[in-house]
Every structure is written in structure tokens, then in C-alpha cells.
Amino acid sequence: MPELPEVETVARGVDARVRGERIEHVWLGEKPEPLKSPAALIEATLTGKRIARVHRVGKTIVVDLDATDSEHHAETSNHHTKTTQKDPKSLPKNAKKPVKPACAQWLIHLGMTGRLLVCDSAVPVPPHTHAIVRLNSGRELRFVDARRFGRLSVVAEEGGFTGGGREPLTISPEDFVALFRGRRTSIKAALLNQTLLHGVGNIYADESLFRAGIRPRRQAARLSRDELRRLHFALQAVLRSAIKQGGSSVSDYVDSDGVRGFFQLEHRVYMRTGQPCLVCGTTIRRVVVGGRGTHYCPTCQR
DNA sequence: AGGTTGACCTGGACGC
DNA sequence: TGCGTCCAGGTCAACC
């Protein structure tokens, strides 16, 4: 379901509601697919930690975890003991300062139908709930995902999780142009490639290509510098506008507060197959590009 | 290596 | 009402 604007909306909503809370208990469901890290590791990493911040990297929701004061000491000495016993190489005896362990992060990818809800523990647990995190306020953070394309994991990377690709909202026009140099695939497939740009999905690929006047099947490498600059501008404008409106809700998107986004009212081509183009009246077409349903106006996009 | 395709899941919409 | 078919905003692994 969610692309960058939807994930951003959820992350902001959840951050406002749970920042600073302590995680008291973690329950994980039986289905294995949603867990990318071992269940025991997720439980051990989350339990007792304070939620420092909830934010977004690409389409991934990132929960920064802090050790609480009392446990921080216990953990540090634990870590130290284990390290010196089991793996002396990683911490040389004569090192003056132990390397500060990277802060743990909880990663949540919503897949297609995933939802992250903050609610009172008295609220009935809906079907397809795969994780329940109890907070010290008594409320719960719940991960619900019917289709089970979503993924939960924990990481402790040096410098924090950064994802693979570049961030579309902050990349410069020059770097954006350079990303597609030599790419023989279609511009649509290139926009969806998360190792180039992260966060762009099917809706915003189609909508930004329409606003830039570029046909989705054009080969990325053959677009002019000017066309790519137009696409850069259109993509950022579309993403910002969608974030402002709380994202799109084509099927079952609901943000952390249970409020639907409104950007779908602004879709100009996405899911408008057979309807007249809002600019020129030409019938909107649907084709398949890179295995994805792709919507465009044959007159406005060249 | 870059590019393409199909598999992974469930549920909703649509046609008969 | 019920059944079959198709479609879905995302990733991966496996192939070319």
C-alpha cells in the first residue's frame, strides 16, 4: 500500500504519539513471513528500551531505540564481557576507548497492506495482527498486515539505517540527472528501482511522469537533461503535495490515527484508465511497464 | 552487472 | 448468494 508520502504520514503520526515511551512488553504472532530478524532477537532488542524517535527512510519506518539509564549500564558491561570472551578481535585489549555500540533501531516495512496503529490496550485486536508492543503509558503499538508482505527487523548499523538509494525529496537536480545516465531500462522501472531512489512507488511514478510530460516507456538513458530536470521538479512537487494531504488512500490506507489521506483526489492518471485527461480530454491509457500497471495520457506525455 | 519475470499472500471488485 | 477471475500501492530470488 504505502509509498513515501504514506510512510511519512504514518511515521509522523506514530512519532507524535509514542516518542519518549518505554517498551514494556513485545508480543509477536505465529506467522513467520513478517519477521525478517529472529523473533527472539526482536523481543530482546525492543524490550525495556525507550523510543527516542520514529522517522522514515525510503519506505521503511525507523524506530530509534535508547537504552534506559539503569539498563544502559547493565547492557554495556554485558556487551563488554561477551566481547572480550567471545571475540577479542573486535575489541583489542589495549584499545583506550571501547567503540560506542551503534544504537539499535527497529525497522518496519509496511509492504502493501501493512498498518501501524497506536491504540488503547482495551481496543479489540483485529485479525492479521502480527506484533503488539506494550508501552509504559498502557497504550499499544500494533502492526497489522493482511497480505503479509510487510517486514519487521532490528538493526544496529554504524551511523544508522540509511537504506539503499537516494532520498527523492532532497536529491539535487544534478545528482538526479546523473542517476539515470546509461540506464537502458524504462524511466518508469528506473523510478521504481529502490537502489537508485528510495520511496517512489507505482502511484507517484505515474503521477510525476504525467506532470513532467514523459511517457513511462521511454528509455531512461535517452531522456534529455531538460526532461530529467522537469521530472525531478514534478516528483518533488507531487511527493510534497501528497505528504501535505496525508497521502493517498486508494484501497485500505489508514494512518496511525485512523484518518484517511486525501491525495487520491488529486490523482491525474493513476487508476483513471478510460477517463478523460484532466488537461486535454484524451482518454487515459493503461499499459504494463516493468510488470506494473501504468497509467498515462498519450497526448500530454511524449 | 543490469534488466526482466514471476512468486509471495489475502481480500475486494466484478461478471456470470 | 455464490463462485471464478482478475487486480492491487512492494520486494526478492532466479533467470537471461
Image (spheres, coloured by chain):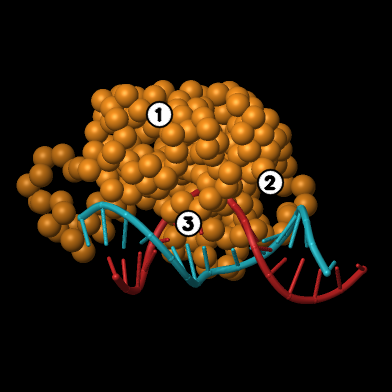
Chain colours: A orange, B cyan, C red
Task: Give x and y (percent) for residue A211.
Answer: 50, 27
Q: Secondary structure at mark 1?
A: helix
Q: Which amino acid type corresponds to the residue marked 2 in the rendered image? A: Ser
Which residue is at the far left?
Answer: A94
Q: Are marks 2 and 1 in contact (CB under 8 Å)?
A: no
Q: CA distance from mark 2 to mark 1?
A: 27 Å
| Circle 2: element type | loop
Instruction: Answer left or right for C16 relative to A132.
Output: left
Q: Gap in Å between the C-alphas at discs 3 and 1?
A: 21 Å
> Quick one: SS at disc 3?
loop
Is residue A15 in sight in this rendering?
no
Q: Which of the image's four quarters has the C terminus of chain A?
A: top left
Front position in the image: A136 or A151: A151
Q: Residue at x 19, y 43 (%)?
A: A98
Residue linked to disc 3: A291
Residue A205: x and y, percent? Answer: 48, 39
- Determine which quarter of the picture holds residue A95: top left
Q: Is residue A81 above or below residue A101?
A: below
The residue indicated by pointer 1 is A231
Q: Position of residue A111 (x, y in %)?
A: 53, 52
Q: Label 3 sits on what residue type? A: Gly
Q: Nearer the viewer, residue A140 or A126?
A: A126
Q: Is residue A205 visible?
A: yes
**Label ID, residue A169:** none
Say if mark 3 contacts mark 2, CB within 8 Å.
Answer: no
Compare residues A210 and A74 and report the one nearer the observer: A210
Q: How many marks?
A: 3
Q: Residue at x 60, y 25 (%)?
A: A279
Q: Which residue is mark 2?
A: A251
Q: The disc numbered 1 marks a residue on which chain?
A: A
